[in-house]
Image: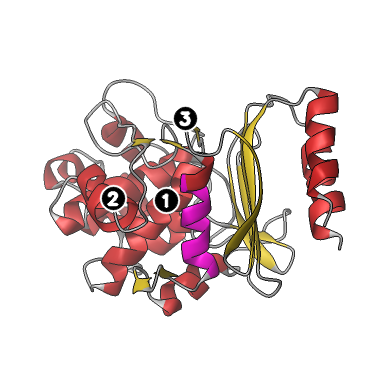
């Protein structure tokens, strides 16, 4: 491992990387930049945080992944739906939403009532799963989970996930109606992101305390829906022998349990280049 070469690539190329950490067998071995002082945007890594919250509720029998999402949503919103929309959404389970297996949803909701907007969206071939990435899928899971646990989801995440991980610097974003958004708008430090990754690296245990069941960790981080990127779990991407949490502008946490390696970094590189990833793979993973 040549972490110094990775840092050199960052500084030489002027890549806007806020900070980076490498853990080997659960021990922090390398760090760069701002890893613990400031919080930064996670973008879609927020979905992986939501997945962990789903796991806590699933482990406690509060959330059935194979029930229709309509079973959990507020009745007043469901009653507004047309009969054809109810029929189409009748095929959509929580699992389908977690795996981005609902085709036809727009990328994001619009207006001031995202729930009504989402439930009015036309689903293509609702009975046939197919990968199509949409923030609405995560938003609907968040709303359904809120109703299932009977508690504000932001408070649930703070109490049941962030606090046990020792994360005290964060920001949680909401929808216009006040639900935890679930798809984006969350901020963490690099260190906070690494702690979430360590929870998964250790099979649901952090600092000797079990937060997620090993069953849920394996299920959520394994391939549940194929896609062109190699596979998708429950808001978690397949990566090499392990998996990753991915954000829009190169916010990443790569978790490789077989190798005992975790690499996390938060960046603000707003392009489609793969230079940072290639440097990380070349200098950190290619040992």
Splitting the image into 4 quarters, where does residue 254 fall?
Answer: bottom right
On residue 49, the disc is 1
Kindly report the secondary structure that dominates the magenta region of the rendered protein.
Answer: helix
- Residue 258, compared with residue 82, is above or below; it is below
Q: Are marks 3 and 2 in contact (CB under 8 Å)?
A: no
In the visual, does 15 lie left or right of 106?
right
Q: CA distance from mark 3 to mark 1?
A: 19 Å
Of 119 and 145, nearer the camera is 145
> Mark 2 or mark 1: which comes first in sequence?
1
Residue at 84% from the left image edge and 34% from the top image edge? 9
Q: Which residue is mark 2?
A: 157
In the visual, does 273 lie left or right of 84?
right
Classed neighbour count for the residue bearing mark 1: other residues with Cα under 10 Å, few (<14), some (14–19), many (≥20): many
Classed neighbour count for the residue bearing mark 3: other residues with Cα under 10 Å, few (<14), some (14–19), many (≥20): some
On residue 38, the disc is 3
Residue at 18% from the left image edge and 38% from the top image edge? 80
User: What kind of element bears circle 3?
Assistant: loop
Residue at 16% from the left image edge and 46% from the top image edge? 74
Residue 196 included in the magenta stretch of the image: yes
> Mark 3 or mark 2: which comes first in sequence?
3
Classed neighbour count for the residue bearing mark 2: other residues with Cα under 10 Å, few (<14), some (14–19), many (≥20): many
Residue 61 included in the magenta stretch of the image: no
In the visual, does 148 lie left or right of 30?
left
């Amino acid at each position: 491992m040549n972490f110094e070469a990775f840092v050199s690539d960052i500084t030489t190329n002027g890549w806007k990387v806020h900070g980076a950490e490498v853990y080997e067998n659960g021990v922090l071995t390398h760090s760069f930049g701002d890893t613990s002082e400031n919080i930064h945007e996670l973008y879609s890594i927020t979905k992986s945080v939501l997945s962990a919250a789903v796991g806590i509720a699933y482990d406690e029998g509060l959330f059935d992944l194979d029930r229709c999402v309509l079973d959990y949503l507020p009745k007043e919103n469901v009653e507004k739906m047309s009969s054809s929309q109810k029929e189409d959404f009748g095929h959509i389970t929580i699992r389908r939403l977690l795996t981005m297996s609902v085709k036809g949803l727009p990328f994001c909701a619009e207006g001031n009532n995202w729930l009504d907007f989402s439930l009015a969206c036309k689903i293509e071939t609702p009975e046939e799963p197919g990968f199509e990435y949409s923030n609405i899928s995560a938003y609907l899971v968040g709303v359904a989970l809120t109703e299932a646990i009977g508690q504000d989801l932001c408070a649930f995440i703070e109490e049941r996930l962030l606090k046990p991980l020792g994360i005290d610097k964060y920001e949680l974003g909401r929808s216009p109606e006040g639900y935890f958004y679930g798809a984006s708008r969350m901020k963490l430090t690099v260190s906070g992101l690494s702690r979430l990754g360590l929870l998964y690296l250790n099979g649901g245990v952090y600092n000797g305390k079990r937060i997620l069941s090993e069953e849920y960790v394996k299920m959520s981080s394994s391939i549940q829906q194929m896609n062109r990127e190699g596979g998708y779990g429950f808001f978690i991407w397949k990566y090499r022998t392990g998996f990753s949490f991915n954000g829009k502008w190169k916010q990443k946490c790569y978790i490789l349990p077989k190798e005992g390696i975790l690499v996390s970094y938060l960046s603000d590189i707003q392009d489609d280049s793969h230079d940072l990833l290639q440097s990380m793979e070349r200098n950190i993973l290619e040992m």
